[in-house]
Image (cartoon, coloured by chain):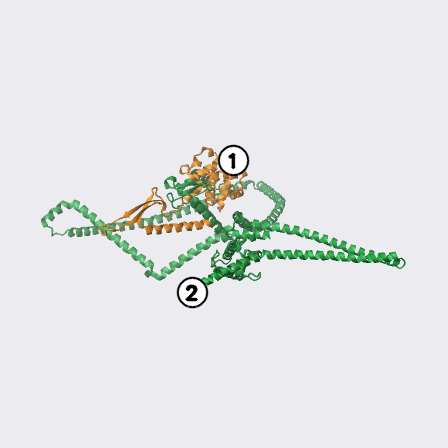
Amino acid sequence: MELGASVLENISLAGDVAHIPDKLFEKFVICACQGVLFEKHRDVVADNPAFKDLERAILKAAYSGLVTLLLEAAKHDTTEQNLSALLEECKYTPERIKEFNKIFLAQKSHIQLLLGKVGSSFPHIVDVDWRLDYYMKNNHMEKVNAAVYLISLKTEVPGESELRDVQFSCSLEQLQDLVGKLRDATKCLEKIAQV
Amino acid sequence: MEEVDRIIIHSLRSIGCDLEDDIQSLRQFGTELIVATVVRCLKMIVGDIDLPSTLPPGMSARFRLGASLANQVQDLGYKGGDLGYQTFLYSNETEIRRIFMFLVEKLPKESSQSSDEPMGSSVLLQRAISSEVATHLSAAWTPPFLKEKGIRSRAKLPGWQREGACCLQHYHSCHVKTPVAVGNLSIKLPKELRAYYSKRMPYVTNQTSRHKDTAPSVMETNSLEVAVQQDWDNEWNQVGLASRLSQQEFKKRKQDRLLKLIRERLLQDNQRREKSGGLGAAGDLQQLLNSIESQAGTAAVKTKGSRFANTEKLQYGKDEEKTLSQVGAAVPTKDTEEEMEQKRQEELDGLRSDLAQLTSDLEQLDLEVRKFRASKLQMEEAISAEQNDREQKQAAHSVKKRTLDLLPDAEANISKLQLVVDNSAQRLVNLAKQWETHRGPLIEQYRELRQYNSKRESEAQKKLEEIKQFRERMKEVADDARKKDELQKQLVSEYERMTKDVNRSAYTRKIMEIVSNIKKQKQEIDKILVDTRSVQKEINSLTGKLDRTFTVTDELVFRDAKKDDGVKKAYRFLAALHENFEQLIKMVEDTGAVVREIKDLEDQIETESNKKVLQNLEKITADFQEMKNENTTLIAKVKGKK
């Protein structure tokens, strides 16, 4: 994890007792987490009366430092030790490091979920409905007598709340081919997982 | 030998040989198992090899398999005696052990190789990815309606994970601002900026128009800063330090260079354009502009025309309609338009001439105004000159007036004036003296200070150099520390992976045990050697003593034997006794040798019996019988075919 010089400076501001007193630090970190996670709390520090006595400019700088740290640490899945080392470099006291780690580790997976939302994807298959029909004859042919599978794949499309159907029909051989392909894909993933 | 067996069996198990749990030594290996494990080892060593891992049923096929195994092992460089099909098919323990020791040594040692060279961070990333994929794979399928926005909990690494693509958003970031240098009191911020920071600037999570863009924006800002810093560091270290400038100077120079480059490029471009003249792009542009202008002109005329026509219609609409109805449809409306055009032209001309008149008037007036202004300035100058003149004259007048006033009582006034002049001179001298007294020490002090200053400057220079050196060293150390940190991280992860692998620890433990055993054995051997030596010594001393006593007794008795018959008899007895005992001692020694020989022979019998000769012989005869049978059946078949 790499942080810019100004970000580090802002993080040290947040850890400085002269700017943010000990009893407000915990609240401040919680506010930073909430501000990152929830849209309705995006202005939570400004709304919170506990911080009204502090110097606004410094508060804003410290807040942005903490927000950057939270996001980057979650992005890199930073461990407690690495985080402690980094905070020590920013002249945090051991109590504050402990406090910060406690709050951050509790929220890390949430922030990671938030970061996991960023990206793009093909439609993602989540479910399937199927039906096996027996196709007997048509106006040209008196006797067809073949099995026809009707497959309806349910897919999730980025940016849409409803599932979208992908429908097609296929014969037994085609379906076997498809299943074989899917099996290959699974094997491929398993191979990756075994490294 | 047990230790060796255990190590061999352990390494065979680690390469995936299918060994039963109760197998503890190589003695328990049957032919089937030996062939299977040897084939497995060869596959591990050579990689691609075409050998069946189980014994074929046919005797001749077995024979061929054994021969090819022997060939393969010899190809690998085995030098422990003659090797053939019999080694595998009719095994004996020691030979099999030797072959397995050789094969185990030849096994590829992946783990040790990979631990030698440190892995890059890409390997770590790969591992993280694979473990993540593994957790995802191990999770069971969950219907989408059970997942709130694609989020599900997971058991391993308790927490949540995202599945599916329903809530994905594109990466979109905007610029976010943070207050700069507010915590540093040494930097003076403008009041307005400070006011903006504290009053108007929104918090960082409130700056993007959509809240979900916050995370990408913040991360991008950070990466941007890191990248810029790295770039600058690189440049500063490569070019900047060599230029011996301060950072600001270097930056300024770079800026100048860039500006100069841009200016030159622009100039070149301009020149090229001028050279190409009207034919080039500029000409095209001019043409284009002209065409646009003309188009706009016609368009304006058209619209104007239509407006005119409209008003015309409004004014004369009724008359025209009448005339039109009278004259009929043949009368074209063009006439009126032409007239109108003419009228308009006239009007336009009139207006133009008016305009020209007015502009010329304006210019004239402007000229006049300028003239007036100039004359006004001149006048002002004249006035000020006059005023100066007047003041001078006034001063002269007042001096003259005073002298005239003083004239009547000239003598007294002159003396008074003299006095005043003298007093003034005195005072001047006094002041000069005082000045001198003050000036001396001040100059001295000034010189001292200057010297001190120059000294300090040189010191500062030196310090600066030192600081530069320190900075470089700091950077080096930091780099070093970072590298070591990374290495440590890698090694830790490596170690975590290794702990599953008991191979190494088992080996080391066994080796340690063997070493201690050997030490113990050596000690015992030493003890026994010492014992033997002391016994030997004792025996030697006893033999010496016996010899000495015997010779003394022999002499004594021999001397007396000449005188006395009884003594003669005793002497004879003594000789017989000595001889008998000598024989006895010899017998004892012989017995010892025989016992040793017996032990040797027993050992030999043991080793021979280990070779399972009898068993193997039986097997060989059975196999031979079988082969014979096969041959007869084959011959019978051939005959039948014929």
Q: Could you say which chain is coloured orange in the image? A: A
Relative image position of residue B483 (x, y in whole percent): 53, 50
Residue nearest the viewer, comparing B217 with B79: B79
Give the chain letter at badge 1: A
Residue nearest the viewer, comparing B2 with B480: B2
- Give the colour of chain B: green
Label 1 to label 2: alpha-carbon separation: 101 Å
Vertical arrangement, residue B266 with respect to residue B215, above or below: below
Relative image position of residue B214 (x, y in whole percent): 41, 42
- Where is mark 2, residue-wise? B638
Asked if residue B202 shows in the view, the reply is no
Give the chain letter at badge 2: B
**Label 1 CA crowd tier, 10 Å (few <14, some 14–19, many 20+):** some
In the image, what residue type sits under mark 1?
Asp
Q: Which SS class for mark 1? A: helix
Residue nearest the viewer, comparing A78 with A147: A147
Q: Nearer the viewer, mark 1 or mark 2?
A: 2
Total labels drawn: 2
- Where is mark 1, residue-wise? A22
Tell me, yes or no, whether dots 1 and 2 are on the same chain.
no
